[in-house]
Image: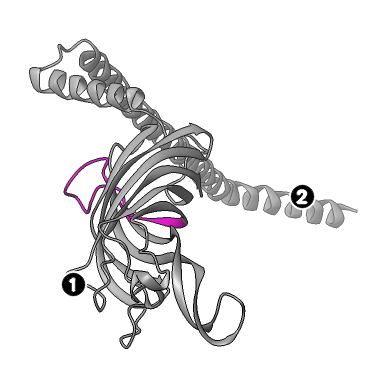
């Protein structure tokens, strides 16, 4: 019993001694761990505080920049306008005024046109035809110098300002066909007697006419206005006469020049009315036939 008690006391004593030896080391380790935790927490807090401070500094810098820009804009708004800037503003106002006051082309107004024309026609001299060159004793009569004409043509717009030479001056290309009627005359018809007897010589009535085919440049002024005067400086004409020229020299075609002038007026939408005067000139006769002459009359046009 005594031995057991001694053994128990010995074990207890050894345990206390061992605990006494171990406790300082444990306390030191615990203190070390506590110090490490505190250090890490302090470092994390310090890093977080530094990051937040950087964000605040950046935000403050942005606010300062915005405030500087607002102050600059306010200063510009209250700054007096210089003479150069005032001149630019005045020039812009004048340009806007001119644009607003400029006449606007009607949406129905077109640059191209198809027209019809007609009126008086007169030749410088009567045409010499195959069938009226025989003596008047056979019943022939000369042709007339006056008559009427009717034709049609197309204007194609080529340029709006005469290739930079004149503002509001349009250059067009014209293709025109014109029929000229110079009336009737008595012609000699060999082989046709008054009584219808073959082999005789008699007279018959013939119409004397001419077809003119024209290709010309046309200059039309005052673009944008309802009233448009125009001129043809010079154009090409091919004259086709009927009946042909005199006996033993039967020809029908004669090239010539044409000059003209007139005016078009836009009465409504794409509808135009006007006046047209032209003179046709050949430098020589067609085997004795003079094709020079004048046409004058009115026009009716449709823009497209």
Please provide percent x and percent y for residue 77. 25, 14
Would you name the residue on which mark 2 appears?
A: 9
On the question of residue 123 being in view, the answer is: yes
Please provide percent x and percent y for residue 168. 27, 40
Is residue 58 found left or right of 9 in the rendered image?
A: left
214 vs 150, nearest the viewer: 150
User: Does 156 lie within the magenta span?
Assistant: yes
Question: Where does the magenta region start and end?
Answer: 152-172
193 vs 144, nearest the viewer: 193
Give the mark, 1 or 2, whose residue is nearer the N terminus. 2
* Crowd band around label 2 with a 10 angstrom C-alpha radius: few (<14), some (14–19), many (20+): few
- Residue occupying image coordinates x 33% and y 66%: 127
- Residue occupying image coordinates x 33% and y 22%: 101
On the question of residue 38 being in view, the answer is: no
Is residue 232 found left or right of 42 in the rendered image?
A: left
Is residue 98 found left or right of 16 in the rendered image?
A: left
13 versus 266 height, above or below: below
199 vs 9, nearest the viewer: 199
Would you name the residue on which mark 1 appears?
A: 284
Residue 263, by quadrant, is: top left
């Amino acid at each position: 019993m005594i031995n057991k008690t001694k053994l128990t006391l010995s074990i207890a004593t050894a345990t206390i001694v061992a605990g006494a030896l171990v406790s300082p080391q444990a306390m030191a380790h615990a203190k070390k761990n506590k110090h490490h935790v505190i250090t890490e927490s302090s470092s994390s807090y310090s890093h977080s505080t530094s990051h937040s401070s950087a964000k605040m500094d950046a935000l403050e810098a942005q606010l300062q920049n915005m405030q500087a820009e607002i102050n600059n804009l306010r200063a510009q708004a209250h700054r007096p306008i210089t003479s150069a800037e005032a001149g630019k503003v005045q020039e812009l106002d004048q340009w806007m005024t001119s644009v607003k006051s400029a006449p606007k082309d009607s949406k129905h107004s077109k640059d191209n046109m198809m027209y019809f024309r007609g009126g008086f026609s007169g030749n410088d001299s009567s045409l010499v035809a195959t069938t009226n060159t025989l003596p008047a004793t056979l019943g022939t009569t000369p042709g007339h110098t006056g008559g009427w004409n009717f034709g049609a043509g197309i204007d194609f717009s080529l340029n709006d300002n005469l290739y930079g030479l004149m503002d509001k001056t349009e250059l067009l290309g014209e293709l025109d066909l014109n029929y000229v009627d110079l009336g009737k005359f008595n012609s000699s018809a060999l082989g046709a007697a008054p009584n219808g007897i073959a082999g005789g010589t008699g007279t018959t009535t013939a119409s004397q006419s001419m077809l003119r085919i024209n290709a010309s440049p046309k200059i039309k002024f005052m673009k944008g206005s309802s009233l448009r005067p125009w001129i043809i400086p010079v154009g090409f004409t091919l004259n086709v006469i009927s009946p042909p020229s005199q006996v033993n020299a039967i020809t029908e075609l004669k090239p010539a020049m044409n000059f003209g002038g007139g005016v078009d007026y836009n009465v409504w939408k794409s509808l135009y009315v006007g006046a047209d005067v032209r003179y046709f000139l050949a430098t020589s006769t067609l085997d004795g036939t003079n094709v020079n002459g004048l046409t004058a009359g009115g026009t009716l046009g449709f823009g497209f």
